[in-house]
Every structure is written in C-alpha cells, then in structure tokens.
Image (cartoon, rainbow, N blue to C red):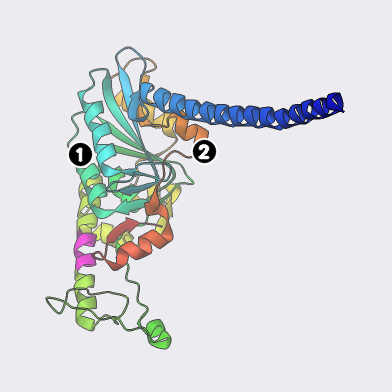
Amino acid sequence: MVSHQDGTRENATAHASRPRKSRVWLWIGSVGAVLVVVWGLGLCALLGIVSGAGNRSVAPVGGNAVGVIYIEGTIGVSISGANGVSGETILEYIKQAESDRRVKAIVVFINSPGGTVVPSAEVYQALREAQKPVVAAMGDVAASGGYYIACGADKIIAHPATVTGSIGVYGQLINAADLFDKLGIEGIIVRSGKSKAAGNLFEHPTDEQLAIEQELVDELYDLFVSAVAEGRGMDEAAVRELADGRPYTGQQALQLGLVDALGSLPDAITEAAQMANIEGEPRVVQYRRVPSLLEVWLGARESNLGDLAIVEWLDAQYALPQARYVGP
C-alpha cells in the first residue's frame, strides 16, 4: 500500500511538472518573438538614419553634372511624402543645386497637379533667380501650380500627352446650413466683425462675403497670369485668353506657346547640358526624397493625415478659406 501510494504521488508530480515546463517554454518563445520584432524595428530605424533617409541628393562623384529636382505629387506648405512635396523641400533642393560646384545646369521634373498658392509662387521665383540654366520637364501632369513652377524655367519640355495648363485659382467653401436645419442643429457663432467666420458650415454666405472671397481669388489669379506672362515672355492679354482654367495636352501647349518643345526627361537633361556648354554625356545629380528601410518595410513612405478627406474637411471649418492652384 505504501509503495503504491508513493508511486501515485510520483506519477502525479511528473504530470504536474510537464504543464509547468510547457508554459515556461511558451513564455520564453513569446518573449523571444517580441525581442526579435523590436530588434528588427530598431535595426530598420537605425539603418534608415544611417542611410540618410529623408530629403537628400543622390549623386555620383565628378563635375560637369546636371542636377535633376523631382517635384512629384501635390505641392503644399509642409507636406513631404508619398503623395506630395513641400515648397520648403523644393526650395532646399534648388539651394543645394545652386551651391553644388559639380552642377552646371538644373532640370526640374514636374509630375504634379499643383497645390497651394504660396509654395508654387516661391518656387517659381527661386527658379527665375537661379544663376544656372534651368529646364522644366513635364511628366504625366504639370497643371495649375505645377505649370506655374514650370514658367520659372528658361525652357519647358513636355510630353505630347502631358496634361498641363489649367491656369487659374479657386477657393472652396462647404456649407451645410440646410442640412443642420433639418437635423435641428444650431450653430452659435460669436464674432468680432461681420466678415469673421465667413464661409462657416452653419450659415449661408452673404453676397458681401462671397464678393470678398471672389476678390481674393481674382487677385491671386492676376498674380498667376503675370507670372506666366513674365516667364513665357507673352503679353498678359494673350495669357488671359488661354487662362480660363482649362487643361491642355503637351501638343496643344506647344502650339499655344505655353511650352518650348516636346520630349522626355532625358531630352530635358540633354538640353540643359547644352545650355551649360557641357561636352559629352553629363553626369546627373538627383535631388529627391529617399525612403528609409523602415518606411519600405512598413509599405508607406510617410504618414500624411493631410491627405485624408475628413481631416481636410474639418480643418477647413476652423481656418481661413484656402485658395489653390490645383488642376486640371
């Protein structure tokens, strides 16, 4: 009896120890997996920093080069990512290309529908003031603010199928006063003057408020037309006839004098090299955003809440109406 009981206890002890050992190995495996993931994220982040992820130039060694600045996506004040680029970033690229002794000429490759007013105007002016020859090359689209920027170049080359032009400006107001009335929602607005909070969701804009908005749009439109006339060497009256907001193909733009030639990015690089008296095939210095390994691993270059429609919609309710050079 005694030996049987002792044997039973031993068996019970053995069975009880097995689950505990299994749980221990399970915890060790879970902790190990977490550590591997954390280590991988840390390594990718470190490699991203070491590789100079962010805005940088990719350049070979040597002189007599053409600098290519890539302007891709919507042009904004502070966005730089997969869907857009900030005016500040473009201006920094221009500054780098101007100061780089290897770079004898600059090409701006534009594949953009445009963006907000100020960045487009600032980049245009920076290109106009550049001390080196500047050629603009157009991709799929170089419309509105994208075309504004192109006019700062000495020459513009477009693909026959490029969508360009769309010379104009618009302001956008969203009003839901009738909807709120049906829902029984009342918006109470306390303001310092009758024109403050104009264009808010809760009230229909008055004729006076709409006139103010129209005046702003007209003034910005005049700036756009003047820039095109200056950059292209055209009479303002002639520009206004073309500047009704419509888009043009590259072929149409050539016939209308809005671009200088048809071609591709390599053609623009060749043209820029000739303008800078570079003999032979020029080296190319690229100025564009290089994604980090972490961004590649996560499958996105940069989180950009500004691209979410709901965020833009909410932002519009608590800010001044924004005018945009966006097309077509």
Label of residue 219 in the image: none
- Please state which of residues 54 and 232 is positioned toward the viewer in this rendering: 54
Q: Specify the amino acid type for callout 1.
A: Ala
Side of 234 where 6 appears, left or right: right
Which-is-in-front pick, marks 2 and 1? Answer: 2
Mark 1 residue element: helix
Q: Give the x, y percent position of residue 251.
A: 44, 47
Mark 2 residue element: loop
Q: Give the x, y percent position of residue 285.
A: 35, 23
Q: Give the x, y percent position of residue 157.
A: 38, 39
Specify whether residue 218 is painted magenta: yes
Label 2 crowding class (10 Å Cα cut-off): few <14, some 14-19, many 20+?
A: few
Name the image quarter holding the C terminus.
bottom left
Q: Specify the amino acid type for callout 2.
A: Gly
Residue at which label 2 appears: 299
Residue at which label 1 appears: 126
Residue depicted at 46% across the width and 26% down the height: 44
- Please state which of residues 77 and 49 is positioned toward the viewer in this rendering: 49
Q: Which residues are magenta?
A: 216-222
Specify whether residue 62 is painted magenta: no
Q: Is residue 259 above or below residue 29?
A: below
